[in-house]
Image (cartoon, rainbow, N blue to C red):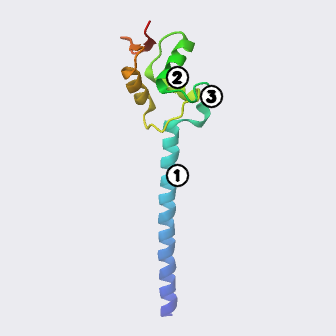
């Protein structure tokens, strides 16, 4: 009976370890899914028009196409929707930093970016 008890205890431990590994895997999957939603929602891409362009060049095209100013969030969403890919955890902040340092853009008091004349 003792060897059966030992075998039963070993199986219970293995089951507990397997459940723990399963929980770790599920947590990792949830984290990756959340990260992917923050980076680039799969259904947000509309075209590849800006693919291969720098963020500044794509933002310039986006604003020209829009014909008016846009917020940082609008620009970031528009760039991703038109082919700009990113691994940035906070793409709007990345866009903001690049536009702030790039020539040809100005930010209005209303918080919108426009092209300088």
What residue would you read off at disc 2?
58
Location of residue 99 with respect to 32 vertically, above or below: above
How would you rate the neighbour count of disc 1 (Cα within 10 Å): few for under 14, some for 14-19, many for 20 or more?
few
| Outermost residue to the bottom | 1
Residue 48, disc: 3
Location of residue 59 with respect to 93 vertically, above or below: above
Q: Residue at x 44, y 22 (%)?
A: 72
| 3 or 2: tag closer to the N-terminus | 3
SS for tag 3? loop
Quadrant location, the C terminus: top left
Q: Position of residue 84 (x, y in %)?
A: 54, 30
Residue 29, disc: 1
| 1 or 2: tag closer to the N-terminus | 1
Q: Position of residue 64 (x, y in %)?
A: 54, 12
SS for tag 2? helix
Q: Residue at x 44, y 12 (%)?
A: 114
């Amino acid at each position: 009976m003792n060897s059966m008890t030992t075998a039963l205890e070993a199986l219970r431990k293995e089951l507990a370890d397997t459940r723990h590994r399963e929980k770790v895997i599920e947590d990792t999957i949830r984290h990756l899914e959340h990260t992917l939603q923050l980076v680039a929602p799969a259904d947000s891409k509309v075209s590849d028009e800006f693919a291969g362009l720098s963020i500044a060049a794509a933002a310039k095209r986006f604003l020209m196409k829009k014909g008016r100013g846009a917020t940082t969030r609008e620009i970031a969403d528009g760039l991703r929707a038109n082919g700009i890919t990113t691994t940035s955890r906070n793409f709007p902040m990345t866009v903001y930093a690049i536009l702030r340092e790039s020539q040809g853009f100005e930010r209005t008091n209303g918080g919108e970016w426009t092209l300088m004349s």
